[in-house]
Structure formats: structure tokens, C-alpha cells
Image: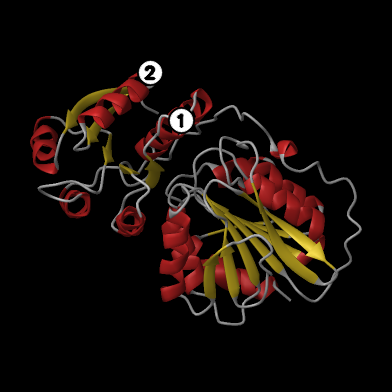
Amino acid sequence: MFDRKIRVLIVDDSAVVRQSLSEIINSDPELEVMGTASDPFVAAKKIKNEIPDVITLDIEMPKMDGLTFLRKIMSQHPIPVVIISSLTSKGTETGIRALEYGALEIITKPQMYSKDFIYEAKIRICEAIKGAAHAKIKRKVAAPSIYVEPKFSADAVLPPVHSHSMIKTTEIVVAVGASTGGTEALTDFLTALPPDSPGIVIVQHMPEKFTTSFAQRLNELCKITVKEAENGDSVIRGRALIAPGNYHTLLQRSGARYYVEVKDGPFVNRHRPSVDVLFRSTAKYAGANAIGIIMTGMGDDGARGLLEMKEAGAKTIAQDEKSCVVFGMPKEAIKLNAADKIIPLDKIASYMLSIAH
């Protein structure tokens, strides 16, 4: 664990954004801004003098775009990078590329909407930076456990599961939750699946619109169909649905048909969508017909939900520490004895298929 403040370098061409981010980051007692840069050339000079623990990077900048800078950093001196970007369609596509090039997280630039919005944006930015600082890209030591007191539990969106009257049917539903490092983990997992794989619903902590680009990118790479979930979408074989950013996604059932409900609601465990919300709804409506998978990510979102799935008769899997970028969510699930099996990322797809019958 850091015995000092985590040092952050802000790279953004907007003076207003640099000032706002500096205020947000310096307001957290565990963080400090070591410097700001208006473009990658200024940033490179600062890095020569002092290496930051984390860089926040805008990807749409003049002179040298953020992607080129990111690739240079990752090839020459890997430093954890959090992308803080606007919500333009071009920006979202570039953001997905940035994750492929090694960025750990995408956060949208805070807009001046309301006190609540600014407060939530502040929490998301600071927690993303802390998660990045402890990610394995930086150090090979085990990441320390960082616990953030949840603002709400899944109770805020869906009442607890009390009865499990679900009889076993032939169709299996797979629910997956991931956060920091999850885009790469999900790409590895989904590209390994055959076209007739069980229906999958995924929560990856990511801002709205970015989930659209992420789903489109995965759809190009995978044998199964991948799309961003829309309210009422059926969960069917050969298709994975990715929860849209800023909305909770719940599994529902009508007769033999599984479908998703996409809805607004409070942040749960500091997240919307929340893995706990998806897992609880899966426990309630799929019971023993489900498989739950919790992957790399900071915090504990999904840990309690995975336990609820296990108690409802589902088979449950946690990604192992060695293959996680941040061993947070799986670690908390394992602590609760929520995982039947703890396995490396490259074995999850084959194991899931072996038990999906």
C-alpha cells in the first residue's frame, strides 16, 4: 500500500478541465496532483523529471492525440492511465481503442449539472485513480484491498431474494460482472465462446455511450452476437447483452423466456449499472438455471450478489488473483465464500461451457 499520497499527472488541453480535475483530485486525502500538462509534449517533459503514479488523459487533443501518447507511454514506460473524455461518438470509439492500448478506466468529464452529479463524478474519478494506482501494470506486488463504504446496496433497486421456487429448466443464463481491467478480460472470455453459447448478461463499469462502442467492438471480434442491452431484449443462446452505462440492468423472466429490464435508479456500491443488482435479479429469476462470474475490478460490487446467486442454486466462478488487473471484486466474493470455483481468466470460458448443461 502507498505510504504517501498517490501522485497524479493531469493531461488535458482545456485549462478549465485541468483546474476542475485538480480541485477534485486534491480534495481527496489519498491523492495529490503532481502536475498538469496542456498537451502530451508538456506531459512527456514532466514525466522525465518525475514519474507519476497515475496519469489522467484526455484523448481528443491538438498537437498529439491522446491515443498516440498512450501507445508511447505503454511501449516505453508503462504508467497506469485513466481516460477522462467527453461523450462525443468519436470520443467513445477512441476510448475503446485506448482500453485496448492499455488504459485502465474511462471516466466521462464531469458536467456542471447538480451537486449530486458533481459529488458522484468526484467519487468515480478519485476511486478510478486509486484503483489504477494499485493495478498490476504498475507493480507486481499484490494489490491491497481498498474498501469503499457503499452508498446503497442492491436493496435500493430490487428487494432481497427470500424464496427460490425456480425449478431447473433447460436454458442456462450466464451473468457476468467486471470493472477495472474488465474490458480486456471480457474480450478474452467472449472471443473464446462458440456461436451456440448460453445467453449472457454483462455489467462492465463504464460510462454511457462507451458501452455502445464496446459492444460494437466485441461484436466484430466474437463468434457470438454482442450488443448493448435495450429494455425488453431477450436473453438467448449465442448472444451477450452488455448493460448500458448509467442504467441498471436486471434479468427478468416471463414463462420460459428470459429478458432484461433496463432502468434508472440510485447508484449501488457507487455504480450504475451495478453488478450486485444484476446478480440479485439473476438469483431471483433464474436460480439454479444460472452461472455467475465475477471478474477483475476494484471494490466489492457483485460480491454479495454472487453469494445470493450461490444460495439460490447457481454455479459461481471468481477470476483468480494472478490473472486479475485489480483483485478487488473477486477477492471480496471469495471472502464471502460466494465462489464455487476460483480460476484463471483463460480457463473461465471452457469451464463455464463444461457446466452449462
Q: Which mark is residue 286?
A: none
Residue type, numbered disc 1? Tyr
- How many angstroms separate mark 2 from mark 1 (CA)? 19 Å
The residue nearer to you, when weighing 260 against 48, is: 260
User: Does residue 165 appear in the picture of this structure?
Assistant: yes
Pointer 1 residue? 113
Q: Vertical placement of 237 versus 150: above or below?
A: below
Badge 2 element: loop
Question: Is 43 on the left or on the right of 258, as rendered?
Answer: left
Q: Quadrant of the N terminus?
A: top left
Q: Which mark is residue 27?
A: 2
Colour style of the rendered protein structure: secondary structure
Q: Vertical placement of 180 versus 286: above or below?
A: above
Q: Quarter of the image holding residue 354?
A: bottom right
The spot of residue 20 in percent (x, y) is 31, 25
What residue is drawn where x is 39% and y is 46%? Answer: 105
Question: Is 171 on the left or on the right of 115, as rendered?
Answer: right
